[in-house]
Amino acid sequence: MRKSEVPEFTQRSQQALKDLVPGFWAKCEARATDSPLIRDGARVANIDLGELTLYPYNADLWSEEQEAAYWNHPDRLVFSDPCQCNLSEVSIGLLNDMIVTLRGSPNEVLSREPVVDAGYMFVFGIGLGYHIPKLVERACCHRLVLIEPLPEFVHYSTEAIDWSEVLKLAEEKKVDISFITGESPAEICKQLEMLVDEKGNTFFDGSYFYNHYYSWALKESFTLFSKAIKNYYLSTGFFEDEIDMMWNTYGNYVAHDFRIIGLREKVLASPIPAFVVGSGPSIDNDIEDIRRLKDKAIVISCGTGLRVLMANGIRPDLHVEIENVEAIYRAIEEYKRTYDLSGVILVGSSTLRPKVAEYFDELWMFYRTGLSSSAILGKFAKPMGGSAPLVSNSGHALAVSLGFRDIYLFGVDCGKPRHGEAHHSRHTVYFQDNFKDLELLMAADFENDRVLPGNFGGEFVTGWAYDSSRLNMERLQRHYRRNLFNCSNGVRIEGTTPQVAAGIDLSNVTTPKAKVMELLRQQLPLFEREKFLRELDMEANIGHCRDFIKEFTELCEAARTEDKGFRDFNARVKDWVNPNLDRLPGILMMVRGSLFSMVRLGAFLGTRIWDQDSREAFFQDFIGLYLNRCLSMAEKTIALFEEMDARRNEELAKLQQH
């Protein structure tokens, strides 16, 4: 059909999609062929698929009946308790305050699921789109995500529904619409994950899933995403951890000399490869090959991978640690008693407990992205992107940062076999009697399991932390594009090349390791402790806290009169926090995670209140309770900075005496 023959209705519908999502619409146009539409008079009734049709009978009637039936038993993601809100001392206090408020109201009994403010509706299948206007009209969610593996169907839908009217209605109802398509279910799932990454999970609770028509691609996309979304159940970041990480970073600065690492675009390319060694169960099968090749590569042990190597007589060149918990110190202390760690360089996050470095002869440090300690105290290098959430991510990011072009992953399983075998190597501390508490934690990581394809085939079980680790490795690889070989018999990591360890040939590597290690040192600047202490401006950071107290109080007061509920309030907080991160880093980097997780906590209770008047009254009470907790965090941050400033003066006095 030539453009001049396209009815005005269809032209208007197509132009609306072209204006809103030009890239997506281009795919729709490119895939459209001679019209397979079946008409009932002037009405588009179905799509001819050859031996069958997309709908069992007229699409408009069938879609109307499906949509009406759906609401009798909607498929929803519903959280059973507020643990997904990352409860900590601050938020637990807020939770207790809110429970007292609820007990004093006639609405103590809450709905099992949110009655307002669901974040998403994921619609699997657009087809001819007759169901879309009705879903928009209901406005049951903030964001309507429309998933269609066959973009040509969207092109055909422009002859069935007027997308310009649909988008106009969505704007009136304050429903954002997103379109997702992909060549495979895995690609569709990845795009959905990227969407949730971008838009956030504050209102994930109560989200809807709507399956419009059956196809293998849609069924598989739904299955993959249903497992992937477990990664977004928890909110991230909390205030108490930021306090600990600030003190640890400060303690490392004043206690140790070290070199600083930062992920940079331009580094000296290493002439030999790097081995990044984790402690997944598959590492036990590759030990002999690592021993065979260790003199031809820089060996980087990650966390409990250190004991795996040392127990097998292999001394790593670099050892990476990231966690700031007491268990790390206990494990390193155990290694030191059992093995000779001399010659092993510790590469640690600035947030490591300072005493960990005492067990190593040399220390290199890096900053983690998104932490208050990096933004406030880390002014000497850029944070090493991609270094979280697990220590194997730090090992991978370190190899990239230091300029290695060829990187081999061992024991970076990101999961465990679906049947049998333990979650880690038998040589790790997790299976020692004095570390049984850690073993229980490791086992719990796989309770929210997700089954994924393996690097060498088969299926593997992963938990949310390990799957997040996999996703972050894939992101880093997409950006830096190293020659990344995965020798681990674990979950497949996109962007890596599966490599059997026994087949690795490094006979062409001739540069001595000692020379490479010296080149690496020369790339890394030395930390200047006295310069840090003299330039540390705690007064400016304290000023950020006082500005926050004033401005955030005004923000909450405005919300009392202007916001209709948690959705409006979350947008208000987000619209104020994000533009002010550079202006007030001394406080916002400390409290940002808790600011949003506490809104999510309030919404968990507030959106379950049936009666609108009671719901609005609770929201008003919440703002006051929330503000009190936020101001308390600001006051504690001021106390932190004042104590840090006093210690800074003491350290400077000591330096002057020497």
Image (tube, rainbow, N blue to C red):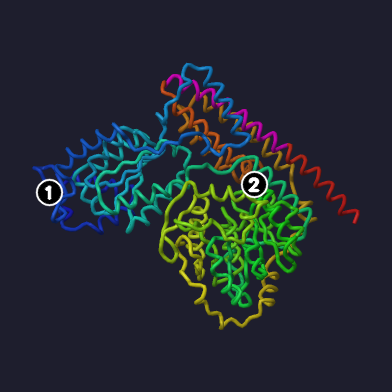
Question: Residue 533 has which mark?
Answer: none
Q: Quadrant of the C terminus?
A: bottom right
Task: Name the residue tied to disc 1.
Answer: 38
Q: Residue at x 77, y 40 (%)?
A: 643
Q: Find residue 409 and report its horizontal and vertical position in percent.
A: 54, 66
Residue at 26% x, 54% y is 150
- Point out residue 210 in the picture as x, y percentages from the top left corner: 31, 41
User: As displayed, is residue 81 above or below residue 375?
Assistant: above
Relative to 604, say whether 219 is above or below. Answer: below
Going by the image, does 334 lie left or right of 399?
right
Outermost residue on the right side: it is 657
Q: Which residues are magenta?
A: 612-638
The alpha-carbon separation of the residues under discs 1 and 2 comes to 60 Å
Q: How many marks?
A: 2
Percent position (x, y) of residue 260?
69, 61
Res. 173 visible in picture:
yes
Lower sequence index among marks 1 and 2:
1
Q: Main secondary structure of the magenta part?
A: helix
**Circle 1 Cα neighbour tier, 10 Å, few/some/many (<14 / 14–19 / ≥20):** some
Q: Which labelled disc corresponds to residue 372?
A: 2
The answer to whether residue 44 is visible is no
Q: Is residue 379 above or below residue 539?
A: below
Q: Is residue 616 magenta?
A: yes
Q: In this orientation, which residue lies closer to the viewer: 485 or 367?
A: 485
- Check disc 2 and give the amino acid type: Ser
Provide residue 654's location: percent of width, then percent of height.
87, 51
- Kindly identify the amino acid type of the residue bearing the numbered disc 1: Ile
Q: Which quadrant of the rendered structure holds the N terminus?
A: bottom left
